Image (spheres, grey):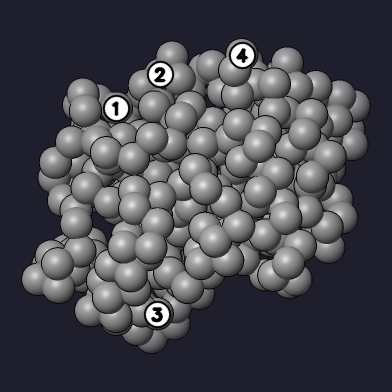
Amino acid sequence: MGGSPMDIGRLGIWDSGLRMGDVGRNAEAAAELEELGYGALWLGGSPGVRHAVPLLEATSRIVVATGILSIWDHEPERVAEEQAGLDEAHPGRFLLGLGASHGALVGDRYARPYSAMIGYLDRLDAAGSPAGHRVLAALGPRMLAAARDRAAGAHPYLVTPEHTRRAREILGTGPLLAPEVKAVLDADPDRARAVARGHLEMYLALPNYTRNLLKLGFGEEDLVGGGSDALIDAVFAWGDPEAVGRRIAEHIDAGADHVTLQVVIPDQDRLPLREWRELAPLVTA
């Protein structure tokens, strides 16, 4: 399929808070992130297309992406209709990120996720949704191949630079590879790892992620108690902005086109604006 025609730069921000809470606060944050130079905003927490609207309206350049929209919760024909509306109002600035989610979150509807995704893409195509304006949340080889053949590329979540290297081998040259990278801006190892474990624990209850981590060489012992030090250090960049920059560089060197940072902080009731400002120099590093 090849890469997206959208310019999302090398560094974006992934955050679920930007689609929840006060709309005005989120719009102001989006405008500041655009001014800071970030290339894309990835809306986490199973967003719908509509969640991109206030952020697009508050900005003029930055791309807004769903990271990711669950195929179980949104009819593809409606998604295509909403996407067309955004493409008309904000040309080249909305990127549709799709994923098959997790059985524990979806419930009895969850069945044959790969086949369900292919069927969903078929219906999107029939409804006129442009393949070059979507990416897939892909971890395994089959979904990565679908991201290569049926979309602009892949948006893997909770991965290491080694996964990025393997994903690039499957995608080949051309398709977009935009991994999510978690960051804790704290140079104290104990504090940083404690914050990371508090965030990671829920993901380690989801088999899609744990299977992928086991394939990357981690053992079962690494997946308990919120994650071993080795696991935390592999999937989180923690320390000062320079340390985060080194991890971004590892993913870029492994084949990523774009890295989307999820800044993890102890206070989940606020947006990490201070941390986003501290990391902004990495946009042009």
What's under tag 3, amino acid-wise?
Asp
| Nearer-the-camera pick, 259 or 50 | 50
Q: CA distance from mark 1 to mark 4?
A: 23 Å
Q: Does residue 137 lie above or below 83 as drawn?
A: above
The answer, for residue 215, to whether it is visible in the render is yes
The span from disc 1 to disc 3 (Cα, nearest Å) is 29 Å
Among the two numbered marks 1 and 4 on one chain, the one whose residue lies closer to the N terminus: 1
Asked if residue 95 shows in the view, the reply is no
Question: Which residue type does callout 2 highlight?
Answer: Ala
Say the numbered circle drawn on residue 65.
Answer: none
Circle 3 is placed at which residue position?
73
What type is the residue that disc 4 sits on? Answer: Ala
Q: Earlier in the sequence, mark 4 or mark 3?
A: 3
Please indicate whether residue 270 sits to the left or right of residue 93 in the image: right
Q: Give the foreground label among 4 and 3.
A: 4
Say which mark, if any, is on residue 168.
1
Q: Which residue is mark 2?
A: 254
Mark 1 touches mark 2? (CB < 8 Å): yes
The percent position of residue 159, horizontal first and vertical second, equals 49, 38
Q: Sequence order check: which comes first, mark 4 or mark 2?
A: 2
- The residue located at (79%, 24%) in the rendering is 239
* Residue 285 image label: 4
**SS for tag 4?**
loop
Please tell me in which quadrant of the rendered image residue 245 appears. top right
Image coords of residue 71 (percent x, y)? 33, 71
